[in-house]
Image: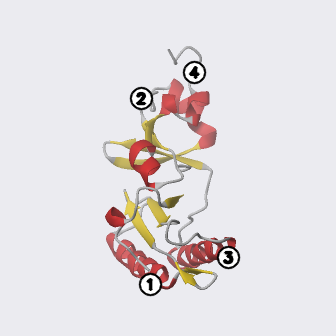
Amino acid sequence: MFIPFEEISAGARVWIYQLNRAISQQEKMEMEAVLRAFCNQWQAHGAPLSTSFKLVYDHFLIVAVDEQVASASGCSIDGSVRILKELGAKMDLDFFDRTKVAILVNDKVELYPIAQLKELFIDGTLKPTSVTFNNLVATKKAYIEGWQVTVDQSWLARYLPKGTLA
């Protein structure tokens, strides 16, 4: 059963998917309709799941399940992945591309190839204070409190030139 993201519990489990490109307003509306229908019928071992989703910056999909109501099982998680693969094929999107890193630049997400990060920090295109995203947060509360982080406080710090961190 779908619940608005603002209303799902802070302890809800989340999965964050970074899209390989920005989506248009039309694509966003189409994706929301498909995801809402999916959430309304999403179950684990026959038990309805209390679910939600949120599209952010036209580059991220946050899916949530309140496991205090019913826990997502391997099969139910596989079902969510299947719907994302179907949406991706239909809309020419990739929800699973891990070769690019998202950085917030002037309130807009820019994607940068991981292989070019060192050069981008050296030439000043990116800075230790640039905002990136921790897509591995596990709960809605962690999403709210720590999804957006500066590069120097993230796993990307390894790409900073020596002597950059204090």
Distance in Å between CA atoms under marks 3 and 1: 18 Å
- Of circles 3 and 1, the one toward us is 3
Foreground of the two, 128 or 135 = 135
- Of circles 1 and 2, the one toward us is 1
Q: Amino acid at mark 4?
A: Pro
Q: Amino acid at mark 2?
A: Thr
Task: Provide residue 101's location: percent of width, then percent of height.
Answer: 54, 46
Q: Quadrant of residue 71?
A: bottom right
- Of circles 4 and 1, the one toward us is 1
Q: Are marks 4 and 1 in contact (CB under 8 Å)?
A: no
Distance in Å between CA atoms under marks 4 and 3: 43 Å
Chain-order first, disc 2 or disc 3: 3
Distance in Å between CA atoms under marks 2 and 3: 40 Å
Can you name the residue that lies furthest to the front here? 68
Q: Amino acid at mark 1?
A: Ala
Chain-order first, disc 2 or disc 4: 2
Q: Are marks 2 and 4 in contact (CB under 8 Å)?
A: no
Distance in Å between CA atoms under marks 2 and 4: 13 Å
Q: Are marks 2 and 3 in contact (CB under 8 Å)?
A: no
Label 2: which residue? 129
Q: Amino acid at mark 3?
A: Cys
Up-down relation of residue 149 to residue 36 (above or below): above
- Residue at left offset 36%, top offset 68%: 24
Label 3: which residue? 75
Q: Quadrant of residue 127?
A: top left
Chain-order first, disc 4 or disc 3: 3
Chain-order first, disc 4 or disc 1: 1
Residue 18, visible in the rendered structure: no
Colour mapping: secondary structure
Q: Are marks 1 and 2 in contact (CB under 8 Å)?
A: no
- Of circles 4 and 3, the one toward us is 3
Q: Secondary structure at mark 2?
A: loop
